[in-house]
Structures are given as structure tokens and as C-alpha cells.
Amino acid sequence: MREPVQSQARVRDRFGALLTASMSVLSVEAVLGGIALFVWGQTQESPGLPYSGLGIFLLVLMAPVMAAVGAVFAALLSIGVVMPLVGVAGWFGHRFSGREAWWWVPVLAAVFTSPSVLAAVVLVEADVLACLGGWLVVSAALAATALVARRLLLPGRPHLSGGVMFWRVALYGTLAVITAGALAGISLYAGIGYEPPRLGAEGVAGTWSDGKGGTLTLTTDGKATATRVETFELDDAFETVVHTCTGTGTWEYDPGTGPWSQEVAVSVDDCPLDTWEVFGTSEHPKLFVYIGDPDSWDLYILKRVADPWRQEPQ
């Protein structure tokens, strides 16, 4: 009776070690992915939206819940995907190579994730290159996790418990996260992040359109003409009320202290126009104001249209 009991204990111990290793690697990969996603987001064209104090508070408040949900998801992914992948890779290795071969893991990971890429391209009509990049990243992350878990099953290797694997992954994962964070900080400091174009008063002068029939024409002598430009205010129930503005007035450009603080103040009779801010690119600049509460991040955007007297950048 003692032999079966010991055998079952070894199986449980090995399963626990595999699960711990897989969940730990997936957690590290999630943090690294978050850093990479943040850096990528900083390189994309976007307005400098304000941080919501309430949003940050709720994020901190929900952090334990998010961590718990992430742990459950990592456990399900480990049991449902990573462990079967390790087992199938081992079977393929013995079946076709006569021995365990590590390279079956990335091959099968790529095969396993390919249907989702095909579905995104065919059903959602997503960008092919973006889907290909995402497929490579997900396949690599899944393969790396499976290779770490596979190490526990190799013959001739010293037995490692779940606790030992956890602390090893935590150590190397922390070093990887610190390195990735430092590289991200250096890259952003070096200027790879997006910043709005410096328009200047001459760059602001021109005709701007919301694409819905509203236009704002700003001339070089400081005069402004609004035609069905939308304005926004909050009523007593804090609902956004939209009005349209048509009239003439004046405008001024404030360069601020940098590209993110540029402002265009437009004053039109009987129209409560907000101060416009700048984003976009030098070739395609945009002006925007917030719709209602700035914490909502809803924007009303004007894009510059080609004026016959303006020489557009090539």
C-alpha cells in the first residue's frame, strides 16, 4: 500500500511544480507585456488626456481583485494549454524523432495559436501584419512558458519543487522586469514617444473641419469664422448638452512651454467656445476640446483641410 501512496504523492508534487512554474512564468510575461504595451502606446498619435484621480483610485482599489483574476486565468491557461502542449510535444518528439526534442514546443505553440490569427484576418478583417506580429508574440510567450515547465519532466535532471521553481522564476523574472523597465525609460527619454507638432501661429491659421459640416476658419490677421461648430456644456443632471456655433470673432495662439501645452483660444460672439489643444502630426494636425467632463476622455476633433493658399508639406 505504501508504494501507490508514494507514487500518488510524487504525481501531485510534480503537478504542483508544473502548475507553479507555468503560472509564475505567465505572470512575468504579463508584466513584460504590459511594459511593452505601455511603450507602444506612448509612440502612437494621441492627445495628452488627463489622468482621472478617481480612475487611479479605483485601479489601486481593484488591484487585489485583478491579481486574483489573473492568477485564476494563469492557472486555467496552464492546465488547459501549457501542460497539454508539453505532453503533446513530448509525444511528437518520441514518435517522430525517437527522443525528447525541445523544438517541438515552439512549433506546436505556433500551430496552436494560428487558428485565432486566421479568424481575426477573415472574420474581423484585421490588419494582416498586426495579426502576424501578435501571433509571433503570443506563440513565443506560450513556448517560453512550456519550455520552463518541460524542464521539470526531463530525465536526469534534479527534482525541483514548486516552491523552488517559484523563487527561481521570481528572481529571474524580477531581473527581466527591471531590465525591460530601464530600457523602456531610456527609450522614452531618448524621444521615441509621440508628441504633438509645434504648429505656431502660421500653422494654426487655416480652415478646420469636424467632418460633419462644422468648420472653423482662422485667418493670419487673427480673425475667426465659425460655421456650425459644436460646443458642449453639462446640464443640472450632468448630461452633456450640444449646441452649434455660427459667427465671427478672433483667435490667439499660445505656444505654452512645449508641444503638449499649445493652446488656441477662439472667441466668437454668443458662443461659449472652449480653448482648443493640439495633437496629430505636422502633415495632418488636429485641434480638440473635451466633450463635457474631461475625465470622460470624449473629444470633439477638428482636422485641418487643404486651403488653396496653403502649401501643404510633402
Image (cartoon, rainbow, N blue to C red):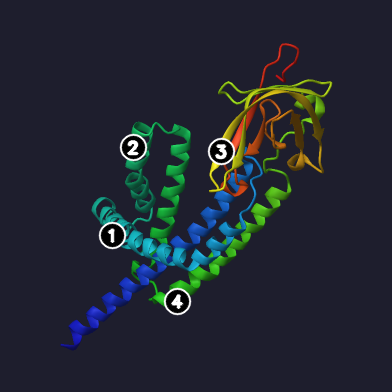
The local crowd at label 2, few if under 14, some if 14 to 19, many if 20 or more residues have their Cα within 10 Å, is few
* Relative vertical location of residue 82 with respect to residue 135 in this rendering, above or below: below
Residue 119: assigned label: 2
Vertical relation: 2 (above or below) 40:
below
Local packing at callout 3 (Cα closer than 10 Å; few below 14, some 14-19, many 20+) is few
C-alpha gap between disc 3 and disc 4: 60 Å
Element class at badge 3: strand
Front of the two marks 2 and 4: 2
The amino acid beneath tag 2 is: Ala
Residue found at x 60% / y 43%: 292
Q: Residue at x 35, y 59 (%)?
A: 77
Q: Quadrant of the C terminus?
A: top right
Q: Do we see residue 207 in this rendering?
A: yes
Task: Calculate the distance from the C-alpha at mark 3 to the C-alpha at mark 1.
Answer: 60 Å
In the rendered structure, find residue 87 and report the number of the disc placed on it: 1
Looking at marks 2 and 4 on the same chain, the residue that comes earlier in the sequence is marked by 2
Q: Which residue is mark 3?
A: 241
Residue drawn 35% across the image and 62% down it: 78
- Residue at mark 1 to residue at mark 4: CA–CA distance: 22 Å
Q: Earlier in the sequence, mark 3 or mark 2?
A: 2
